[in-house]
Each structure stands twice: as structure tokens, then as C-alpha cells.
Image (cartoon, coloured by chain):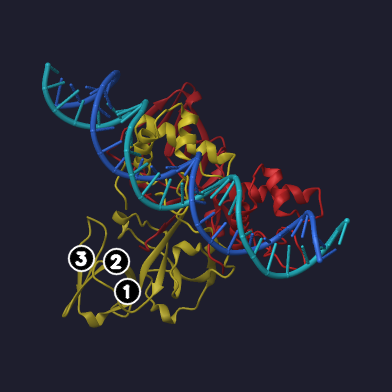
Chain colours: A yellow, B red, C cyan, D blue
Amino acid sequence: MSDYHPLTRKQHEIYQFLVKHYQHSETAPTLDEICIGLGLKSRGSLHKHIQHLVEAGLVEPSNRQQRGIRLTPPQLSPMLDINPDDTIPYLGKIAAGQPLEAMASFSRITIPTQLKTKNECYVLQVTGDSMIDLGIFDNDWVIIEKRNYAQNGDVIAALVNNDEVTLKIIEQTPNKTILIPANKSMQPMHFDPNNVQIQGILVGQMRSYIH
Amino acid sequence: MSDYHPLTRKQHEIYQFLVKHYQHSETAPTLDEICIGLGLKSRGSLHKHIQHLVEAGLVEPSNRQQRGIRLTPPQLSPMLDINPDDTIPYLGKIAAGQPLEAMASFSRITIPTQLKTKNECYVLQVTGDSMIDLGIFDNDWVIIEKRNYAQNGDVIAALVNNDEVTLKIIEQTPNKTILIPANKSMQPMHFDPNNVQIQGILVGQMRSYIH
DNA sequence: TTATAATAAGAACAAATAGAGAACAAGTTT
DNA sequence: AAACTTGTTCTCTATTTGTTCTTATTATAA
């Protein structure tokens, strides 16, 4: 996403000050107040530090409507979480030789709204190591948005040869569909487009470390 | 819903004054009374602030029958109640230089029960690449079970030098604590055990592929 | 050494915010 | 009726605040 912005000593000190400030205050401090708190005499100098924090993504870019320096809220919108009905069907293991349509829905799983789209989604459990270079490991769960099309480069769940569902990166040409594993030690596989049915595209992933 | 009306300093101060006033009084204060209470000399200026509070929905629009400035009765907050069972607090980004205890809980997040333990858990967002060999990438979310101990080989969130929270593999000996990144290109770091405070251990992980 | 980055102070400026006071209409009190 | 209170609107002015610039000083790297 954003580039890496290492903090200098002073920037770190200022960020600390802000975090501490917000632990016991609701109001966004002004540059002058921060100056006083840190023993600085110039708003101008402080401002440059703050700007660096903005670039680092730690502080919100100031807007004309609302003065004061405020930390960036978490990107997650807390509002979205109150939807009581964000469960989606769990369809079992991927790469198990069944068209997904045909599968009965085993159960439903509660997932954070951040991991799904507005469209119909379902959860599959991954088998195998074909996507480890993307950080998708054996037994991980993936959230798939149900779809029958994709763009080149998308990670998709596809039914191959009417027999097996796999998770791969897709490259499509008019007369060929290539499924590329995210694993250096595996080879891309070439198919007739008729033998590859796209089931959906990857939108989220989960892993449990509990034994 | 209604638009967002951020409060300025003065508006906040005035609102606080009103709240305090109603804690020990039934009567609605007039503009002049508020002026006196706040050391203002002009009703006109105060009135503009009050109007903003009305727009923000905090103060009732005045009517001719009933003079005085009165707060809007507390409305039902739909945010608060809906099953808090499988939501856990989101505490912000990891590796950002604050003890977790000290951080205010930004918001709560719904997670599948499979990703947490029975004990107290919270969510952090990962910054950096120090755990990529374990498939934990920049911007992933990790679920941490709150704990102050761990076993060798556990992945833990730890506060280092009272300054920075990181996610690492831990190796402990009586007189040394080693934090090992899961990244071939990074070196293990050695610490005095007193300088490493364990905050919790990794129990789950999530990633969103939605742009 | 030279060069570069970090830090600091202060001047100047525009926009946002805050304040004072005057005037007025509708109600209340005397 | 006259005097006063109260919410409202208006104009004018003052202060605060984020921003940009220029100028120094110090520390660190080449």
C-alpha cells in the first residue's frame, strides 16, 4: 500500500505525545498546544514534523473544516460491524472434486464485514501449498465472492475439468486459460477455456493458530 | 442519517456547560445566563454557537412557547448493544510504539469464533514484513490472546524497551530473551528479559484482498 | 573537509473561529 | 401602557490556527 516512512526521533516523540494526549482527552490539540507540551517555540517547525507523520499515515491530513491535529482512526469502520447478519456459508474444502453449486452448505461462519464484499460470498478451506507465495497456507480459510468471470491476475476459485476446485491466479486469452500457482516450485497449467469454470474470486483470508 | 457535525472548541465547552448545568438544575438556562456562566459578553455570539449545537443534534431547537436552551433527550444508541459476544476490541497498528494496555480501544470487530480462544483477545493490524515467512503480511490483522507469558517458539506480541510493540517468535533463556523474525533477511534480536514484556500470543489472522 | 538531513525559530498570510454590540420582534412583567 | 426579558439577525473586529517561507544551528554521512 503506502511506502515505508521511518520516523525520526522527534517525529516519534511527537507521535507519542499525541497518543498520550488522546488517552485522556477528546479534543484535538492545536499546533500551539503541542508546542507547549513539547517545549517548542515555533509552530512552523512542528508543522513539518506533523506533515511527516501524515505521510507516514499516523496522523490525519488536516482539513479546513475541523482544526486540530488528530490521529488516523483505524481504517476499519466501526459502524459496519454492527450488522448482526454477517454470516456466510461454509462450503468445505477446496480442491476436493465437486462443483460448488452442488455442495450442500455445511454451516455458516461469522466473519468480519471487512473480509467480504457486498455481493454473495462463501468460505472455503484451502488444501495444499499452491498459493504459499501469497501467504495462503494449507488449512487456511478463504472468502470467495461468487462470480463467473475474472480479470487477468485475479486470484480465483475455479472448477477444472468438471472435477476439481482450485485456488489459482488466472490468465485468460481467447483460446487458452492459464492457472498459475503462487508457488515457485510449481508450474502454470494450461487449459481449454471450456474446461475452466470460474466459481468466484478471492476477497478475504483467515487462519487459526489454535491447535 | 444526519450529516456529521464536528464541534469546535467553544461549542464543546458550551455543551459541557449545559450538561453540567442540567446535573443540578431543572430549569433551562437562557442565553444571558450561559453568557455569565462562561464569561461572555455578547448574546449574539453565543447564539451562533448554540445554533451549531442544534444542527449537531445536541441541543433542541428553541420554540416560542418554552424559552431557554435545553439539551436533546439522549437517544437510543443502536451502536452499543447488538450481540457483543463475538466482537473483540481493535487496538490499532502494531509496531507503533505504545504499550497496548495504555491504548484506548478504537472499535470492536466481529470475528469468527474459530479465530479466537475462550480468553480475552484483541485485534491488531500488522505493519512491516518481519513475519512474511509465516504468511503474515503488511496490513494483515492478527488476533492476539492477552497473556503475559509464552512458550519458546510461540508467536507473540511483545512490548520492547517500553517503546514498541512487535510480533515475533520468542525464545527465552533465564538471562536472555530472543525475538526472532519470520523473515530470512532479518536477524534475531537479543534482549535483557526485563526489556521484553509479553502482551499476548498469536491465535488468529485475517487478510482482506478488497482493494 | 564537504554535503546532507534533522531540528529549530520566526515572519507573514489566509481561513476559521470567536467576540462585541446594535437592532428588532415577540413575549412577560411591572 | 411602559419597562423588561429573550431569542434572533446583522455588522464589524479580534484572535486563533494551519500553512508556507526564509534563515540558523547541529548532527551525521560521504
Which chain does the numbered disc 2 sit on? A
Say yes or no: labels 1 and 2 on the same chain.
Answer: yes
Mark 3 or mark 1: whose residue is earlier in sequence: 1
The residue tagged 3 is A188
> What residue do we see at 40% from left, 69% from top?
A144
The circle drawn on residue A173 is: none
| Amino acid, disc 3 | Pro
Residue C11: which quarter of the image?
A: top left
> What residue do we see at 40% from left, 72% from top?
A145
> What residue do we see at 30% from left, 78% from top?
A149
Above/below status of A43 relative to A138 = above
> What residue do we see at 22% from left, 80% from top?
A193
The residue tagged 1 is A158
Mark 2 residue element: strand
Mark 1 or mark 2: whose residue is earlier in sequence: 1
CA gap between label 3 and label 1 equals 14 Å
CA gap between label 1 and label 2 equals 8 Å
Q: Position of residue D25 (x, y in %)?
A: 28, 19
The residue tagged 2 is A168
Above/below status of A19 relative to B55 = above
Above/below status of D8 relative to B203 = below
Residue nearest the viewer, comparing A56 with A142: A56
Q: Residues within 10 Å of mark 2 (few under 14, many from 20)?
A: many
The answer to whether residue B154 shows anywhere in this view is: no
Decide: marks 1, 2 in contact (CB < 8 A)? yes
Which chain does the numbered disc 3 sit on? A
Mark 3 residue element: loop
